[in-house]
Amino acid sequence: MIHLLAFDIGNTNIVIGYFVDNKLIDHWRISTLEGRTADEYALVLQGLLGQERFLAITAGVLSSVVPTAVASIEDLFKQHLNVSLFVVRGDCNMGMPILYKQPHEVGADRIVNAIAAYEQVNAGCIVVDFGTATTWDIVTPDGAYLGGVIAPGIQISAEALYQRAAALPRVPFVKPPKVIGASTVEAMQSGMVYGYAGMVDTVITHIRSEIDFDTSCIATGGLASWIAEESQCIECVEPLLTLHGLALIFARNRG
C-alpha cells in the first residue's frame, strides 16, 4: 500500500495532498514561508496528519515554483521519514510532449495541471489557474502541451493597487452586490471579480480563435470558484487539479 504526500509549492501557498493507493484522502493549504526548516515542516505535518499517518508515509512527490523550499522538503523526507521524494522537473517522465520553444521554461505546476486536465477530459482543453499569477495552458486533442498565457494574479494586482494608490484601501476578495460599486470598497471588489472574469473570457476567446480544435475549459486555484461564477467560458472547477496531476506523474515514474 502506497501512502503518498504530494506538495504543490506556490509563491503564496503550499497545497498538500495525502493519497493512499492513488486515492486522495485529505488535503491542506498552508502559507509558503521562506526559511521554514525540515523540522518545522515535520511539526506542521504531524499536526495535520496525526503521528500515525505521518509515520505511515511511504513516498512523496513535489512540484515547486519556489526553489528554496525544495531543499527543506527533501531534508524532511530524509531526516524524518527516511523515504524517497520525487521532485517534478523538466527531465522527468511527464507523459506529455511540450511544444514550447524552450520546454525548460514552462513551470512544473503548469505541466502538472495540463496532465491532470487531459487525463480527466481526454480531449483538447484549456486550464486556467488562479494562483499568484493567473495562467492559461492549452493542451491539444492528442495530449501535447501547446503553450499558454501568463498574467498577474488577482491578489497581487489588488495588493499593488493598495500599495501604489494612496487613497485606495486594502479590501477582501468578496463579490459585491452589483457591478456598479456604491462605495470605493465595492468598486474595487467589482474590478477584482468582474474585471478578472472578463479578462479570463477574453483571453480564452482569443485562444480559441487561434487553434483549430475544440476545447473545454477547466479552472483551478484558490479563487477559481469565485471567478467561474461570472465567467462565460469556464465549464468546470477542479480546486485540487495540481495534486491529482502530481499523483499521476508519480505513478508514471515509480519504476
Image (cartoon, grey):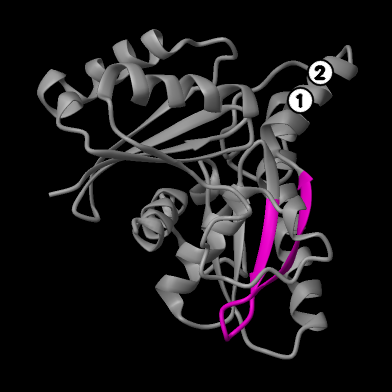
Q: Please, what secondary structure does the residue beneath circle 1 have?
A: helix
Question: Marks 1 and 2, Cα distance to the nearest angstrom?
Answer: 8 Å
Which residue in the protein does label 1 denote? Answer: 184
Residue 149 highlighted magenta (yes or no) = yes
Q: Magenta span covers which residues?
A: 135-151
Above or below: residue 182 compared with residue 124? above
Q: Looking at the picture, which amino acid does disc 2 mark?
A: Leu
Above or below: residue 170 compared with residue 249? above
- Looking at the image, is mark 1 or mark 2 earlier in the sequence? 2
In this view, the residue in front, 212 or 251, is 251
In this view, the residue in front, 118 or 160, is 118
Residue 162 highlighted magenta (yes or no) = no
Pinpoint residue 166: horizontal percent, then vertical percent.
Answer: 88, 12
Q: Are marks 1 and 2 in contact (CB under 8 Å)?
A: yes
Pinpoint residue 47: horizontal percent, then vertical percent.
Answer: 24, 15
Q: What residue appears at the point 16 percent right and 25 percent down from the top-left corner?
A: 55
